[in-house]
């Protein structure tokens, strides 16, 4: 399937479409990370796809390509403590808003992967499976995922007994076993879902 949903807006005369997606809604620990990404109208790469479909190596390659070609991108991070205070849905929205606010470049259209966010005076569309339809959303998904994975590697260095590098905070057998054996890491594990 071609990732060219943005063309609908380019054909209407818009020039700057921002795609937003997040990573880290399902894990038991760590932040939720969102990316807002603006790509050039003529950007196209077969390497860009839904981040869940890419190997780690392909994600890293795509990340480098996206960073090198982006007109702009912004990152929004919401901590596990904030997730516990807000809930994961509201925390994901907040991460997306932070990512949008981090952009320096002007934009005219916002596309998200099924998440509604409150922004006025801008065309907005929440697409179901947006990371499989729009290149800017798929690219944002990749940048958010790689950014979060790198944060997980930093946590793994701090807490090596938990094997965070291998499970990235998701509820794998290894992670659940470590939780049972060592207990949750204060300020890192989430207590609400």
Image (cartoon, rainbow, N blue to C red):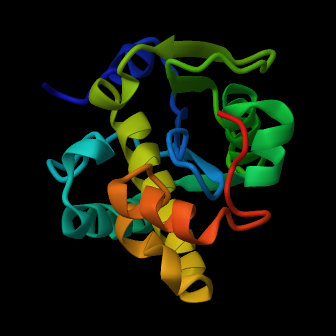
Of the pair 105 and 141, the residue shown nearer to us: 141
Give the x, y percent position of residue 171. Answer: 44, 49
Give the x, y percent position of residue 43. Answer: 30, 47
Relative vertical location of residue 74 with respect to residue 174 in this rendering, above or below: above
In the picture, which quadrant includes the C terminus?
top right
Give the x, y percent position of residue 27. Answer: 52, 48
The residue shown at (41%, 68%) is 68
Query: Is residue 104 in view?
Result: no
Relative vertical location of residue 126 with respect to residue 31 in this rendering, above or below: above
Residue extending farthest right: 85
Relative vertical location of residue 182 with respect to residue 159 in this rendering, above or below: above
Query: Is residue 22 in view?
Result: yes
Give the x, y percent position of residue 59. Answer: 28, 61
- Left or right of residue 26: residue 102: right
Which corner quadrant of the image does residue 134 belong to? top left
The residue shown at (71%, 18%) is 122
Which corner quadrant of the image does residue 73 belong to? bottom right
The residue shown at (33%, 21%) is 5
Relative vertical location of residue 153 with respect to residue 167 in this rendering, above or below: below
In the picture, which quadrant includes the N terminus?
top left
Of the pair 74 and 90, the residue shown nearer to us: 90
- Left or right of residue 15: residue 5: left
The residue shown at (31%, 47%) is 51
């Amino acid at each position: 399937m071609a990732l060219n949903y943005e063309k609908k807006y380019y054909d209407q005369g818009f020039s700057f479409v921002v795609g937003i997606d997040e990573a880290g809604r399902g894990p038991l620990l760590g932040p939720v990370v969102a990316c807002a990404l603006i790509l050039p109208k003529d950007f196209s790469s077969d390497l860009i796809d839904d981040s869940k479909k890419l190997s780690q190596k392909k994600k890293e390659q795509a990340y480098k390509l996206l960073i090198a070609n982006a007109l702009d991108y912004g990152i929004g991070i919401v901590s596990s403590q904030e997730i516990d205070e807000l809930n994961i849905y509201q925390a994901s929205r907040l991460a997306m808003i932070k990512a949008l606010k981090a952009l320096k470049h002007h934009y005219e259209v916002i596309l998200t992967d099924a998440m509604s966010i409150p922004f006025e005076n801008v065309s907005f569309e929440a697409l179901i499976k947006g990371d499989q339809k729009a290149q800017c959303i798929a690219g944002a998904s990749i940048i958010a995922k790689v950014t979060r994975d790198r944060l997980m590697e930093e946590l793994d260095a701090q807490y090596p007994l938990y094997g965070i590098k291998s499970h990235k905070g998701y509820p794998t057998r290894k992670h659940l076993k470590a939780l049972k054996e060592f207990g949750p890491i204060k300020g890192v594990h989430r207590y609400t879902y």
